Image (cartoon, rainbow, N blue to C red):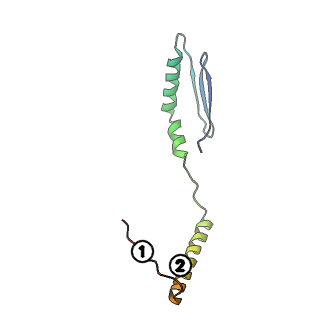
Amino acid sequence: MFPSFSFSCLISKGMILYVAHMITVIEVKKNTNESNMNLIRRFSRKVQESGIIQKVKSKRYNERPESKIKVKAAKLKRLARRKNHEKLLKLGKAVEVVKRGHR
């Protein structure tokens, strides 16, 4: 899930961006005789330079690795299933599956 952004925008005073889960604060104060579009442009440039968006996008699909116990249990389950299938093949109660190569 995408981490939440808290975006405060007071065009007359300036712009501030707070990012949850990261200690990053970007603040841009409005200069005298500066247009609102120029303020937004400067703010966007600061956000891009800080690399916040790249960090958030890289963490977007990050998954924790499975615990060693779960991995071991799954492996044991596969081995038991394979052993049982081989036993059924010897008894003639299962049909051998023909594996194809990659296409």
From this view, report whether residue 73 is shown above or below residue 52: below
Q: Secondary structure at mark 2?
A: helix
Q: Amino acid at mark 2?
A: Arg
Which residue is depicted at the point 55% across and 45% down? Answer: 60
Quadrant of image for the C terminus: bottom left
Reply above or below: 68 against 57: below
Q: Disc 1 vs disc 2: Cβ atoms closer than 8 Å?
A: no
The disc labelled 1 sits on which kind of residue? Lys
Residue at 60 percent of width and 39 percent of height: 22
Q: How many marks?
A: 2
- The residue tagged 2 is 82
Which of 88/26 is in front? 88
**Label 1 sits on residue:** 99
Across and down, in percent, residue 10 comes to 62, 20
**Residue 70, image x, y percentages:** 61, 66
Q: Residue furthest bottom?
A: 91
Secondary structure of the residue carrying tag 1 is loop
* View extreme (left): residue: 103
Q: Residues within 10 Å of mark 1 (few under 14, many from 20)?
A: few
Instruction: Of the two numbered discs 1 and 2 on the same chain, state the one appearing first in sequence.
Output: 2
